[in-house]
Image (cartoon, rainbow, N blue to C red):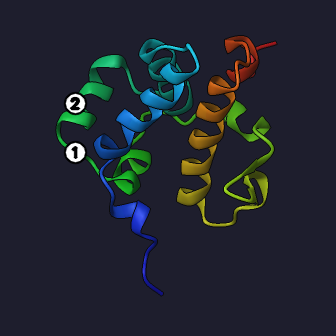
Amino acid sequence: MAKHRIFTTSFASVYPHYITKAEKKGRTKAEVDEIIRWLTGYSQEELEVVIEEKTDFETFFAEAPEMNPSRRAIKGVICGVRVEDIEEPTMQEIRYLDKLIDELAKGKAMEKILRTT
């Protein structure tokens, strides 16, 4: 079975869309970056390198320094699919990120988005 197209899409090509979505709702690039760092464990410098090198999504998640264990608390529907029910691990990671960006754009507090107690 062929890989989904998003796996070979560069993270850098989608990243500006995350920022635009957030900024349209009064949120910031810094908040988008904070979410990405929280989810993946990348430092800001590492994130900037990934973007500059146009790393694809599959590699972006495969090489993430430390996926946040609290990401399993992310629940809900994205693109008509419940994120907690997605069986393909990389696709689930991508959809977790999509869900977090959606929550940001919907005005949710960062503490709730980052699942802090």
Q: Is residue 117 above or below residue 105?
A: above
User: In the image, what residue occupies the spot 79% across and 36% down?
Assistant: 73
Q: Position of residue 56 (x, y in %)?
A: 31, 53
Packing grade of label 2 (10 A; few <14, some 14-19, many >=20) is few
User: In the image, what residue occupies the spot 70% across and 62% down?
Assistant: 86
Q: Is 29 in front, or is 70?
A: 29
Q: Is residue 24 above or below residue 92?
A: above
Q: Is residue 108 above or below residue 69?
A: above
Q: Position of residue 113 (x, y in %)?
A: 70, 22
- Total marks drawn? 2
Residue 71's quadrant in the figure? top right
**Type of amino acid at the residue the image marks with label 1:** Lys
Q: Is residue 88 above or below residue 52?
A: below
Residue labelled with disc 1:
54
Look at the image and tell me in which quarter the C terminus lies: top right
Extreme-bottom residue of the structure: 1
Q: Is residue 53 left or right of residue 87?
A: left
Residue labelled with disc 2:
49
User: In the image, what residue occupies the spot 71% across and 31% down?
Assistant: 70
- Depth check, mark 2 against mark 1: the one in front is 1
Q: Is 27 in front, or is 69?
A: 27
**Type of amino acid at the residue the image marks with label 2:** Val
Q: Separation of disc 2 and disc 1 at Cα? A: 8 Å
Q: Secondary structure at mark 2?
A: helix
Packing grade of label 1 (10 A; few <14, some 14-19, many >=20) is some
Q: Position of residue 42 (x, y in %)?
A: 40, 27
Say which mark, if any, is on residue 39: none
Q: Is residue 86 left or right of residue 3?
A: right
Residue 92's quadrant in the figure? bottom right
Q: Secondary structure at mark 1?
A: loop
